[in-house]
């Protein structure tokens, strides 16, 4: 687990990772939760993620709550496939309804060594976030 720079005293932000083996192949799984406090802080976190992923040698999946303010923020990561993107937007967080909008703040990214074969929202109300689900193939 690697701490991410944040201004919040209420919630630490981290990039967690684990390596799993699928059919004899090592795959790195990352999970994170970026800051919602301000875009400038989140841009620093995006830069850290971009560098970390650019240096990754294993096939990888990155999941998390990215707290984006615009889907264009997902373009901060290159060389990956984003399940939630400008063409396919999944409203994973509905908020409190006060702004009338939906938010595509949760995402799944996969490296170019992996292929997303299917994706959808899970049908559950267990959280204030709607889980984004993807099938990934080596």
Image (cartoon, rainbow, N blue to C red):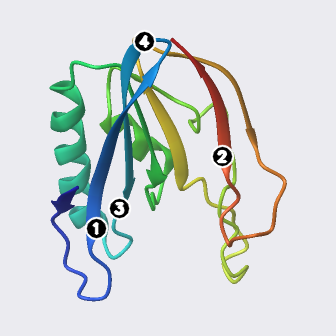
Please name the residue shown 38% across and 24% down the image: 27
Q: Are marks 2 and 3 in contact (CB under 8 Å)?
A: no
Establish if 135 lies above or below 74: above
**Mark 1 Cα within 10 Å, few/some/many (few <14, many 20+)?**
some
| Image x and y of residue 135, in percent | 65, 26
User: Mark 1 or mark 3: which is in front?
Assistant: 1
Disc 1 and disc 2: Cα gap in Å? 21 Å
Marks 2 and 3, the one that precedes in the sequence:
3
- Based on the displayed image, in which of its 4 quarters is residue 77 positioned? top left
Circle 1 is placed at which residue position? Answer: 13
Q: Which residue is mark 3?
A: 34
Q: Is residue 89 visible?
A: no
Q: Which residue is mark 2?
A: 132
Give the mark nearest the N terminus, 4 or 2: 4
| Quadrant position of the N terminus in the picture | bottom left
Which is closer to the viewer, label 4 or label 3?
4
């Amino acid at each position: 687990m690697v701490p991410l720079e944040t201004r919040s005293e209420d919630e630490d932000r981290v990039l967690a990772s684990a390596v799993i083996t699928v059919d004899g192949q090592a795959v790195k799984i990352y999970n994170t939760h970026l800051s919602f406090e301000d875009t400038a802080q989140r841009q620093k976190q995006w830069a850290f993620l971009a560098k970390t992923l650019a240096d990754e040698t294993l096939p990888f999946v990155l999941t998390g709550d990215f707290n984006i303010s615009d889907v264009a923020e997902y373009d901060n990561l290159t060389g990956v496939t984003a399940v939630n993107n400008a063409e396919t937007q999944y409203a994973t967080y509905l908020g409190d309804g006060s702004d009338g909008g939906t938010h595509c703040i949760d995402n799944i990214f996969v490296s170019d060594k992996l292929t997303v074969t299917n994706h959808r929202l899970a049908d559950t109300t267990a959280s204030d976030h709607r889980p984004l689900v993807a099938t990934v193939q080596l």
